[in-house]
Image (tube, rainbow, N blue to C red):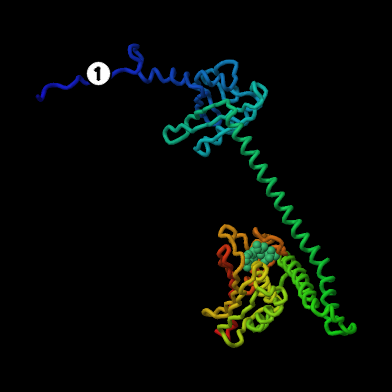
Amino acid sequence: MIRTGPGPPTPEPQHLDRPGSHGAAELLPRVLDALPVGIGLFEVLGDDFRFRYGNHALARVLMLEQMPLDGQSVGDVFRRDEQAAIVELFRLVRVSREPQTYFAAAGGRVPARDQIWNIDAYPVFAGGRVSYIMVLAEQTDEKLQARQREQLEANRLRRKADHLASLEKAKSEFLRLASHELRAPAAMLGGYLSMIEDESLGPIPERLRPVLPLLKAKAAQINMLANEMVEAARLEDGRLQLKRKRVDLRELLRRSLKAAEPNGTPKHRLRFDDRVGHELWVLGDPMRLEIVTGNLVDNAIKYSPAGGDVTAQLSTVGGLAMLSVRDQGIGIAPEDMRRLFVRFSRLAPYGDVPGTGLGLYLARELARLHGGDIAAVSKPGKGSEFTLSLPLESSQK
Ligand code: ADP
């Protein structure tokens, strides 16, 4: 059955304060008085600000002995030590026509030391000008705590930054010192070993012959390390200047492979995959480029402790010479890739592999000084490939 007829009766509009007789406008002062926040209204009269209205909380929050009187000047409402700041705050609101905040730390009349006053002042417009200023005053320790937290955090970050800066300085200082201390003895060691080798110090005892290449390789390693340190220190001081000339990259790579041979074990196979088949000229600093290629080849050997192929490949792409060194070693975890070229950064697991974490940093900086770059791809447990790109000398392009 369908029932027709009038629906339920529409309720009569009701006053909020039913059953009393007050309207919403009359209720407003009561609502304002119920708020825990101090509210005050000041009329702007030229340079003066006169009190017009305040709710109950205003006197309590501002710890006034009594509610200010209508027409009382702002200077008489606030404590003497705050008058100037509040007048300034009001002026700022009047001029900027924007809300402003006054933040006062606990003062004489505030009961708890960790409490503060927070006074927000808002412009009230009439006829296009700021005619009144409304203030909201709170006495709360929450904001203080937030501010203290911010302050603590800022201090912590500053201390950390200072600490990092001092560590950086210490590292640079270490580089400078160590490189000086290491270079002279390393050069002397290399010199004497060469003299022993060419028998200018007398005939080589038979038993010494087999270890001589190893000693020479180790001396060359120390020499290279010292060189790296000197170069890194120069780079940091902005003192590194390339001495460029025409360099045959193919010949340079051959030299690096030959120099690295004694570092490998019988399980390593050093291979040269020459896809160019003739000289490959670049404009570069031979000594610095040798640091780059030496590093890539040495790393390929060092970080493949189980041996395997270490393949250096030479090719060209567009106007670039591409020199890559591929190994079948331990590889690099994806999350470690971004730390590869960071100064002094060594990635786990490097076990007892000697190194400083300087080589790749220096190699990439040197490549970039030459207008080139170094990129790496790797698979953990499978091996890595580092590719140096360098602009070809213009006659080669
Ligand atoms: P290090 O003196 O430690 O060899 P590098 O700057 O040359 O310093 O290399 C930084 C780190 O990058 C190394 O400690 C190593 O963890 C990693 N690494 C460099 N080359 C290879 C590679 N071919 N295979 C695996 N890891 C490598």
Q: Position of residue 212 (x, y in %)?
A: 80, 77
Q: Which quadrant of the frame does ligand 1 lie within?
A: bottom right
Residue situated in front as seen by the camera: 333 or 366: 333
Q: Residue furthest bottom?
A: 278
Q: Which amino acid is tagged 1?
A: Glu
| Side (left or right) of 100 relative to 29 | right
Q: Quick check: can you spot residue 281?
A: yes
Q: Position of residue 72 (x, y in %)?
A: 55, 21
Residue under label 1? 12
**From the image, which quarter does the N terminus lie in?**
top left
Whether residue 162 is situated above or below residue 250 in the rendered picture: above
| Side (left or right) of 350 relative to 218 | left
Q: Position of residue 396 (x, y in %)?
A: 57, 85
Whether residue 100 is situated above or below residue 199 in the rendered picture: above
Q: SS class of the residue under badge 1?
A: loop
Q: Position of residue 81 (x, y in %)?
A: 66, 27
Residue at left 10%, top 25%?
Answer: 2
Whether residue 169 is situated above or below residue 203 in the rendered picture: above
